[in-house]
Image (cartoon, helix red, strand yellow):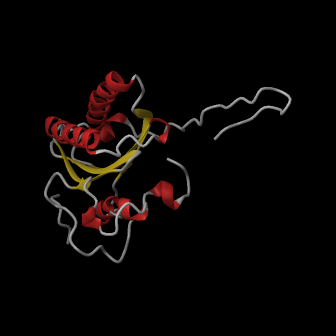
Amino acid sequence: MSRFSSAALQSSPLNHRMKTPFRHKNIRLPLDRYVGTSWFFVTFCCEHRKKIFLGPTRTQSFLDNLRSHALRHALAIHAYCIMPDHVHFLSEGLTPTSDLLRFLTALKKKTGFAYKQETRQQLWQKKSYDHALRSCDPPDLVAWYIWMNPLRAGLCIGVNDYPWSGSLTGAGPSSVPPQEMWSPPWRRQAAPI
C-alpha cells in the first residue's frame, strides 16, 4: 500500500579540434500532459555538472525555493534529493490547474538569477529530464530511488544520514528500503540524461 495520497565530435587532427555540444532530442510530452494531477519524476543538472550544492547556504536556499514554488504552483513534492551537481524530485499535481512546466520554469529562473547575480555564471542546464509516472511506476519505489541517490554516490552510509533529501509532504523514508527497486527509463536504456 502506498504511503502517498493519491559528447563531442572532433575534426581531423590537422585542423583545430572542434567540439560540438551534445544535443538532447526533444522528447517533451504534449504541454497539456504537464497540467493537472499527474505524478512526475524530475531530474535537472547544474551547468557543466558543476558541484554547486556542496555547502549548506546554496543548498538550503534552493530547498527553500523548492518549497515556496511548490506551494505557489500547487504541487506536492513527495521526495527530493539535492545532490552536489543535480536535483531529483517526485511531484504530484494537487489541482486540475497545477502546471509542472510553469513550476520548473519559475524555480529554475529564480534560483538561476540569484546564482548569476552572485557568480556571473549559469546555474542550470537548459533542459531537464521528466518522466510521467505510469501504473508500473509505484510512487513509493520512485521516492526510494530518489532517497537512495546519495548512497549510490557514496555520500553517506544510511538513507537518513544525507541532510539534503527528504519529503516536503512528510512522507520521508522509513528505516528499511524496499527489496524491489525502481529505475528511471533512461537508466534502464543506458542513455544519458
Height in image: 68 above or below 88?
A: above
Q: Is residue 157 visible?
A: yes
x, y percentage for residue 131?
38, 50
Q: Quadrant of residue 125?
A: top left
Q: Quadrant of residue 180?
A: bottom left
| Quadrant where the image shows the N terminus | bottom left
Name the residue: 42% across, 26% down: 121
Name the residue: 25% across, 56% down: 163
Q: Looking at this rendering, what residue extends furthest in the right direction?
A: 14
Task: Give the tally of numbered discs.
Answer: 0
Out of 28 and 83, give the one closest to the viewer. 83
Q: Quadrant of residue 141?
A: bottom left
x, y percentage for residue 56?
26, 45
x, y percentage for residue 33?
32, 41
x, y percentage for residue 90?
28, 52
Name the residue: 17% across, 51% down: 168
Out of 31 and 161, give the one closest to the viewer. 161
Q: Is residue 140 visible?
A: no
Name the residue: 36% across, 64% down: 136
Height in image: 74 above or below 156?
A: above
